Image: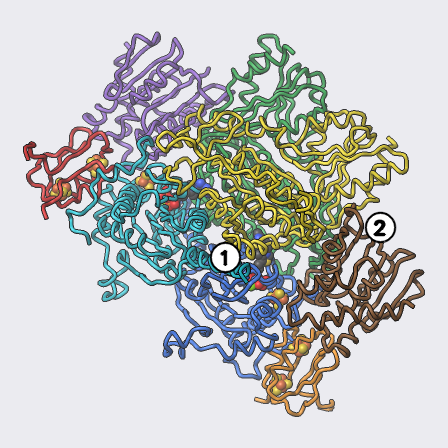
Chain colours: A purple, B brown, C red, D orange, E green, F yellow, G cyan, H blue
Amino acid sequence: MKHEIRLSGLGGQGLVLAGRILGEAATIHENLYAVQKQSYGPEARGGASRSDVIIADAEVDFPYIDEADILLTMSQEAYAKYAGRVRPEGILIVDDLFVRAEPKKHPGRFFSLDFTRLARNRLNNDIVANIIALGAVAGLLGVVSRDSLLKVIEKRVPSRFIDVNTEALDLGFSLIGEDKG
Amino acid sequence: MKHEIRLSGLGGQGLVLAGRILGEAATIHENLYAVQKQSYGPEARGGASRSDVIIADAEVDFPYIDEADILLTMSQEAYAKYAGRVRPEGILIVDDLFVRAEPKKHPGRFFSLDFTRLARNRLNNDIVANIIALGAVAGLLGVVSRDSLLKVIEKRVPSRFIDVNTEALDLGFSLIGEDKG
Amino acid sequence: MNRVATPKVQILTKLCKRCGICVELCPKEVFGTDDIGTPEVVRPDECTQCLSCELHCPEYAIEVVRPEE
Amino acid sequence: MNRVATPKVQILTKLCKRCGICVELCPKEVFGTDDIGTPEVVRPDECTQCLSCELHCPEYAIEVVRPEE
Amino acid sequence: MASKTKRFFMLGNEACAAGAIAAGVRFFAGYPITPSTEIAEYMARELPRVGGQFIQMEDELAGIGAVIGASAAGVKAMTATSGPGFSLMQEFISYSAVVEIPCVVVNIMRGGPGGGAATVPAQGDVMQARWGTQGDHPVIVLSAATVPEMYYLTIKAVNFSEKYRIPVILLSDESIGHLRETTEIRPTESMEIVNRRKPDLPPEQFEPLKADMGQAPPMACIGDGYRVKGYCRLTRNERGDPGAVPDVQDRLMRRQESKITANLADIHMFEDMGAGEADVVVLAHGSNVRTALCACARAREKGIRAGVFKITTLWPFPYAPLNRAIGRAKGVLVPELNLGQIIGEVERACKGRAPVVGLNKVDGTLITINEIFDAIVELNKS
Amino acid sequence: MASKTKRFFMLGNEACAAGAIAAGVRFFAGYPITPSTEIAEYMARELPRVGGQFIQMEDELAGIGAVIGASAAGVKAMTATSGPGFSLMQEFISYSAVVEIPCVVVNIMRGGPGGGAATVPAQGDVMQARWGTQGDHPVIVLSAATVPEMYYLTIKAVNFSEKYRIPVILLSDESIGHLRETTEIRPTESMEIVNRRKPDLPPEQFEPLKADMGQAPPMACIGDGYRVKGYCRLTRNERGDPGAVPDVQDRLMRRQESKITANLADIHMFEDMGAGEADVVVLAHGSNVRTALCACARAREKGIRAGVFKITTLWPFPYAPLNRAIGRAKGVLVPELNLGQIIGEVERACKGRAPVVGLNKVDGTLITINEIFDAIVELNKS
Amino acid sequence: MSALHKVVPASEIRKHLSKTAKRIWCPGCGTAIAMGGMIRAMVESKIPEKEFAVITGIGCTGRAHAYVDYDSLQTPHGRTLPVATGIKLARPGMHLIVFSGDGDLLGIGGNHFIHAARRNIGITVVLVNNFIYGMTGGQVAPTTPTADTASTAPYGNLEEPFDTCALAMAAGATYVARTTAYHVRQMVDFIGEGIKNKGFSVIEVLSNCTTQYGRMNRKGSSAQMLKWFQKNSVSLKKAADLPPEKLSGKFITGEFVTGKRGELSARYHELITQKNKERVDAHEA
Amino acid sequence: MSALHKVVPASEIRKHLSKTAKRIWCPGCGTAIAMGGMIRAMVESKIPEKEFAVITGIGCTGRAHAYVDYDSLQTPHGRTLPVATGIKLARPGMHLIVFSGDGDLLGIGGNHFIHAARRNIGITVVLVNNFIYGMTGGQVAPTTPTADTASTAPYGNLEEPFDTCALAMAAGATYVARTTAYHVRQMVDFIGEGIKNKGFSVIEVLSNCTTQYGRMNRKGSSAQMLKWFQKNSVSLKKAADLPPEKLSGKFITGEFVTGKRGELSARYHELITQKNKERVDAHEA
Ligand SMILES: Cc1ncc(C[n+]2csc(CCOP(=O)(O)OP(=O)(O)O)c2C)c(N)n1
Ligand SMILES: Cc1ncc(C[n+]2csc(CCOP(=O)(O)OP(=O)(O)O)c2C)c(N)n1
Ligand code: SF4
Ligand code: SF4
Ligand code: SF4
Ligand code: SF4
Ligand code: SF4
Ligand code: SF4
Ligand SMILES: [Mg+2]
Ligand SMILES: [Mg+2]
């Protein structure tokens, strides 16, 4: 078992944190093996950002992703750059607010979801779009449970933000639940 | 033709300058080839000092002296260290004031001369002992003339000291002249 | 001059990074913002030509007509 | 005490580097020098125990008996 | 024991810092530089919690200087940096070797030369780690290939440094320093932790520089009451007094060199991962190891006998073991994130027995499995 | 012309400084360190007399920094130092290579490591001269064997630096820097003096980093009116703008490397002094050359065919020429005033064709004719 | 102070920017405001463009060399002043502006800073002090106020910050001033005075690093940080009348030193002229 | 000042010297006088010998580590203070004396000097200022007076020297004093005060390098140089009343700063104690 997940967008969207939570949940609470690598441009803020996570049931033999099993893009630039590097049977997810996608080009499953608008409108907090997306990704991935993720979120997020993050995570899972059918 | 001359004593006795004058005179005014290398201890003043000069009629193939043709020692320490490293047919010169020598150990020619006392008593200037010695060495050496040496001295020595240095040089040559006979 | 009177404050939106400095520093609340924070001149007539916005804009994206001498 | 009275100034000649400081700084010209510049106590009785020689000797080679309290 | 092993999802740089603390490091001084800074940040947070000290100094020279000071005072100490800062530490590394004050320097390599590219991996400082300093002196250089290795090799580095009183350099690069990875950490009690030897003689009899060939002398630290001397310029006798006597200097230099040459078996860490039976041997270290292993696996699937010779101890370079391992090889491939550095040593080791070919990348990206695979296929043809 | 040749009795260090001035150097900045300081002292005295500038800076980093500044402003510039100071210059040497601002660094080697022994010769910085810096970049390293060579090689060093826009390191050691020797100086007019190329395009069209492989681009200097950009961190496009694009970085690195690899014939200076016909080849540079020649002469007197392969360009190392030269050798002897540095390259060059044996001395004294002679006899037996 | 209508317009700044380099400073970064101030002062000085060179070090501030359209050069971290010293001696006619950060100039570069001041070499330093190492992600700087937080001072800074201006004065600088990213017109004036001074000039610009220092120390938005400077700046004159306790947490702004003494590159050129004369005289004699 | 009869005798100095190392300073060198002063102050302090460590750099002055019989260490040139900082943090109970030259501490080591002062780390610096790089043969130093001659300033120094004490104060040192090799009793007192100060102390000792600086600037014998110090020293108090022109060529001696503020290694140990307490509390909670 080996899953390669790429979360991409802009610096400041919290994708590095999302990837880290995913990997940590897999490692510590699912007893799996994970790696996560971010890359970013030279900007401290606002540049391109990418967070690659691999989850496997044995030590990861090669920690870098060429083609992803799941690709999340939260900016048009990221979409342009990475949409072509998803496995044919892989899953492509975009943030509806930022990405104008061409779903036909992608043979596998495709989701255009409203992470950022939902965060803003339903949770009153732009910043948790990443956790909604994380929920959706984890839901599609299927190997890291909501509870495992939540345990890590509780450790990594200041206590006053735990509630909204929990809501966001559940919202994310639910998006997929709905859509999956 | 190749002559290896070692001038040894203490820092401050001016042996480096003497060696330099000898080499420069040979190079520039006798059209010979010369090298000169000094070595000293870590002290800025008062430590052991050595100035090796080689003069030859072709480029010097090897610039360091193992056994000397002419050895001048102006301290007991230098005598102890270098007297054993004179060629059998070589010349050993010591400053009578500082060195208690064992002439019998040396098969070649031996001179114990009064450079420092002569400087002090005849020229009223301790510091020109080195030039008296230089004159003596040059006299014994025979390949660098008094005039050549004088030209260099005139260039290297502050003008107010030229006279006393000239006297010193001549005195040195004369010591050998006397002694040579 | 026959030209149309230029507004006293102009924003070169292409250069703007949406830092909010001009909006927050303008003493006359001349600026508003759109959905994603891009400043817009909403009360041009209030402008006293104090130059605060122009002097502080880190992208050199604002120009204010200089007050008469 | 039964010992012979120590002179007020003592030079440990073995340590001396013949810098001349003690000789030149002594206000009472207590020191003279030999042929090659080694200081010698030549006027011990002149010594006022000012300590200048001891304090300035770079070789810590001079000792002066401390003045009585 | 396995039950006590703990799992973490750690950054390579954090694993390094955590390893250092496990090894007993209680002092860190440094100067920020990407991509090493997380090591300093971890230390700033954690050291005061375990009674240790962190200080950010005014530059890298001061960083390693303070580390050497703390070590001279008896505390295990470490610094971390990247290329430009590593260059600034060279004088002190040489000093540390000659005064035999242990210290560990971590260099998380980034794109070089010059200011370089701070956020991309490279292996441009591999030769510098051995030869960057003035004068001859021994040094140990290790290269970490994974995040868990960052943890365990840091412990090794500290151990070597204390045992041999030698500067130890741990190399890794951005792609590992900034990689998060599942890391299983064994309890510290189960690991060998080395502490420098203390003098066994009283101060009057103790000679700070006296040791047999192959050995570091016991170390009297500042504050131990030994009125310790001898932490100074090159030439000192065994009592620690200065004086430029040729045979004393010679003895010191040769004894220090012998700490490496007499202990190769202890210091060499390498792994023959199918190289011994291979037609094509890939010599890899650091971030190229996993890539090389994947490429060789693929090659074997295609019927090509390919194997990896992984080196963890870069310096002293394992000439003899490598020479033995290439027994039947038709060619040796050396992938490097530089213009060809360790390949020179491979050539020396191979002594012309097999062609040695480099695969070099300096554009800021990692060498890919495909690139190594293609090179293996090519070499196999010859 | 011979009539115009002048004879001097010069210190090696003075010959170096005089050569620099002959080559057009008009700026020197440095920091005193034995045994190099006479170079600075000569420059302090002579440069203002020829309209040039000397400045003693606060440390070696500042010394080479000022040199690079002056060179960026269009003036040929040089610094000089010894081991510890050379270590402090490494970051800037790497910088100079990547921004392609010419500079010459003279290192008069002394006993190392650490503070070292300031007044004795050594060759401990030979590998450092090539590998002391962060990252990969080209560099040229020359080694002077006599006082006259100090003069002429300094001119060569300045020429190479200007021609290839590259840092050039001139190595020598205390035994030559502090040697006075009859030195015949040909008139400057009779010598090749190279000046860096100036842009042939107007500022609007000029791209400061644009050049063919094997070439340095023409150089627009500060104050030339070009609004010159591109003197900055590694990754820049040909216009000089920053941006970390892999292929741009790759092209820059490879083009800079090619300045060396495409011009080996121009850069290599070596001399086969009987090595081609020898049973025992002595590979020597710097202060060992004359010793080796005398030892070989003595060996030949005793019927042993011995010859010297003298290398003046240490880096790039002349692998192929050496390999050719050892055609019939039974053994290669490599005398070095270190624990074995250039010998590694000799082994690479020889590819196992002949045994390579080191003769190493690190006690602060020179290798003697006897020692080399004895080693030749020994090697000849095998 | 220049009257409002004389302020160099933003369009004029843009004319002196690189047409091709993308500025990657964070939105609202005070370094950009300071760079604008520097260019305004350069324009106001009326000195021909080609007589200027802008030298930067490494750091966010140290990116400016790529953004301006003057002769420019970026040195290794901390080494602006040695390189600028070399340039100035080689081309004494040039006006050199060193534009760099507090870490670059006072951290790793502190020795060059005091020695350049001592030499009174003709260089104008615009020191952008944002109290932090911005570019590397918010580490403590030699200017970080005591007890403030940084990524390498997670429990609050235990050290005291430098008083940049006091240090520059003690070391020998002949023009020293402090202003803030809020006080742009003052900034332009001070930099202009610095350029006019023949010797070594230091203009410290307190600046907002909103992303690192601001975030870690809860200073709010960029505009809020600028207002913080506005509110807490005290002019040198006023400060003289206030007791020390009233000055804690305040920024003292104004011109500290405007002294004169010989500039180094000029002195050196006198020496050259004299040596040249000696040679000519000797020939004629 | 201690009364004469209390002055530590030379024999006591000798007890604290290495029995085996040969001192190779020139006859009459002021560095030796300063080392004697340091040892006298250490003895007078009554602090147990094993709590002292003497750290030197490279230079003539930097040879002292081998001559004293205390814990000692010689660093690379210019790096005394970083190394001492590491020692002090690791062993806050130690009393560290840095004994080094003007070139070592203010030339190559200038950055560490101002940063150690800024941090107020508990180190006592005895800075032996002989206006020259003695050991390397008389090159110009950052302390060489303008127009004086040195081997690398053959036409007279074009630069201005540092005012060491002003620099130390501006950087943050909490005890700063100047004395000379002539004023040995004052020297002992000042070094003693420096040792007592918990923070960073600088005692500048003006000293005679007769061989290099003295020879090149015709200052005569060692004793004559000491007399030069005697004649031209002006106490801080007296100097306050004199016009600047009367102070040119004078040496202002005395104690400049005797302020107090938190010492770094002590602050750090408070932090450790606090973190330890937090942990214990957390366990108990
Ligand atoms: C020798 C070296 N050490 C460290 C670094 C890493 N580095 C780059 S910028 C910087 C600090 C910059 O701080 P500052 O000068 O205050 O600039 P800012 O980013 O705050 O504008 C550091 C430590 C480097 N590039 N080179
Ligand atoms: C990195 C380095 N640069 C230069 C030197 C050479 N060096 C040794 S001592 C010294 C100057 C010493 O001057 P100072 O500190 O004033 O000591 P003094 O000899 O005058 O007592 C220099 C430049 C060195 N040892 N290391
Ligand atoms: S100040 Fe400038 S960059 Fe900021 S929001 Fe206003 S126009 Fe945009
Ligand atoms: S000039 Fe002043 S009043 Fe007008 S818009 Fe700008 S800030 Fe507001
Ligand atoms: S002061 Fe000391 S060293 Fe100098 S002459 Fe007197 S006793 Fe000798
Ligand atoms: S104590 Fe004073 S008076 Fe006595 S010998 Fe010494 S210097 Fe002279
Ligand atoms: S990190 Fe700070 S200093 Fe750097 S660009 Fe962003 S706001 Fe400006
Ligand atoms: S050179 Fe000067 S400082 Fe050095 S020992 Fe001699 S007199 Fe003292
Ligand atoms: Mg900053
Ligand atoms: Mg000095």
Tell me if I can see residue F102 in this picture. yes
Q: Chain of mark 2?
A: B
Rendered view: B29 above or below D1:
above
**Marks 2/1: CA distance?**
44 Å
Find disc 1 in the rendering and name its residue. G276
Q: Secondary structure at mark 2?
A: loop
- Left or right of G253: which side holds F9? right
Q: Secondary structure at mark 1?
A: helix
Given residues B146 and E241, the one toward you in this image is: B146
Give the percent coordinates (x, y) of residue F382: 86, 30
Say whether marks 2 and 1 touch (CB < 8 Å).
no
Percent x, y of residue E335? 57, 23
- Vertical placement of residue B24 versus G242, above or below: above
Look at mark 2 in the image and give the residue it sits on.
Answer: B1
The answer to whether residue E321 is above or below residue E297 is below
Q: Which residue is nearer to you in this view: F218 or F81? A: F218
